[in-house]
């Protein structure tokens, strides 16, 4: 493999990962020696800095990560405020499906079904306006009741909640 191809592979892995990758992880994937990975990464860092690119590769905590150029923070903030990401993580999707099928329900009920803390997923879904607080449950502590929103229906292309697939529909799809 040529040097340019090696750099391209490292770039692609960093881009796809979206998070910090250590040299041992990069070595495992690329099968390149650690010393060569470090040299290639140093070269990539310099190339991105020299171009003053929109994204940069930085060395952080014994690893590497692709990040946006801090000089463009004004534009990034403007974009993020006007174009909220539509992608949902698996925990958020799990939480959303539980709420969609069992609403209204409280966070403790969601967590009993999922078996894990759901604070982050609920917060994300509230920020994306896919769920809303529908009131409070009449129990000690009066926890919030959560349900889906009109945006939820739009996101999934549904007229109403009766269009959600049933368990029978899902089993048929898996069998097909």
Image (cartoon, rainbow, N blue to C red):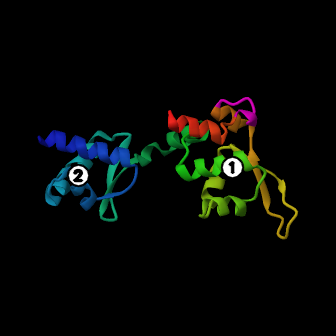
Looking at the picture, how far across and down is residue 62, in whole percent? 30, 64
Q: Residue furthest left?
A: 2
Mark 2 burial class by Cα count in 10 Å: few <14, some 14-19, many 20+: many
Looking at the picture, how far across and down is residue 128, in whole percent? 65, 44
Looking at the picture, how far across and down is residue 56, in whole percent? 34, 46
Task: State which quarter of the image contains the N terminus.
Answer: top left
Q: In the rendered picture of this protein, how many numbered marks are placed on residues?
A: 2
Disc assigned to residue 126:
1
Q: Secondary structure at mark 1?
A: helix
Q: Secondary structure at mark 2?
A: helix
Q: Can residue 78 be spotted in the picture?
A: no
Q: Give the CA separation, mark 2 to mark 1.
A: 39 Å
In-image side of 23 versus 96 (left or right): left
- Find disc 2 in the rendering and name its residue: 41
Which label lies toward us, 2 or 1?
1
The residue located at (71%, 64%) in the rendering is 108
Residue toward you, 48 or 62: 62
The residue located at (88%, 63%) in the rendering is 138
Question: For residue 37, which quarter of the picture?
Answer: bottom left
Q: Residue furthest bottom?
A: 140
Q: Earlier in the sequence, mark 2 or mark 1?
A: 2
The residue located at (24%, 61%) in the rendering is 24
The residue located at (71%, 61%) in the rendering is 109
70 within the magenta span: no
Please say if the residues under marks 2 and 1 sit with CB atoms less than 8 Å apart.
no
Q: Can residue 13 be spotted in the picture?
A: yes
Looking at the picture, how far across and down is residue 158, in whole percent? 69, 31
Give the extent of the magenta segment: 157-163
Mark 1 burial class by Cα count in 10 Å: few <14, some 14-19, many 20+: some
Task: Please determine whether, in this image, residue 101 is positioned above or below residue 176.
Answer: below
Residue toward you, 107 or 45: 107
Disc assigned to residue 91:
none
């Amino acid at each position: 493999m040529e040097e340019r191809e090696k750099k391209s592979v490292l770039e692609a892995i960093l881009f796809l990962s979206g998070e910090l990758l250590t040299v041992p992880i990069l070595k495992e994937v690329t099968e390149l020696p650690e010393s060569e990975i470090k040299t290639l990464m140093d070269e990539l860092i310099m190339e991105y800095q020299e171009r003053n690119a929109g994204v940069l590769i930085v060395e952080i905590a014994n690893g590497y990560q692709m990040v946006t150029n801090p000089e463009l923070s004004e534009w990034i903030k403007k974009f993020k405020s006007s174009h909220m990401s539509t992608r949902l993580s698996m925990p958020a999707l799990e939480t959303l499906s539980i709420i969609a099928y069992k609403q209204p329900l409280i966070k403790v009920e969601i967590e009993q079904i999922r078996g894990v803390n759901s604070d982050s997923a609920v917060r994300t879904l509230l920020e994306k306006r896919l769920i809303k607080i529908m009131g409070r449950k009449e129990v000690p502590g009066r926890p919030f009741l959560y349900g889906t929103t009109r945006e939820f229906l739009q996101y999934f292309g549904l007229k109403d909640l009766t269009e959600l697939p049933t368990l029978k529909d899902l089993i048929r799809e898996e069998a097909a």
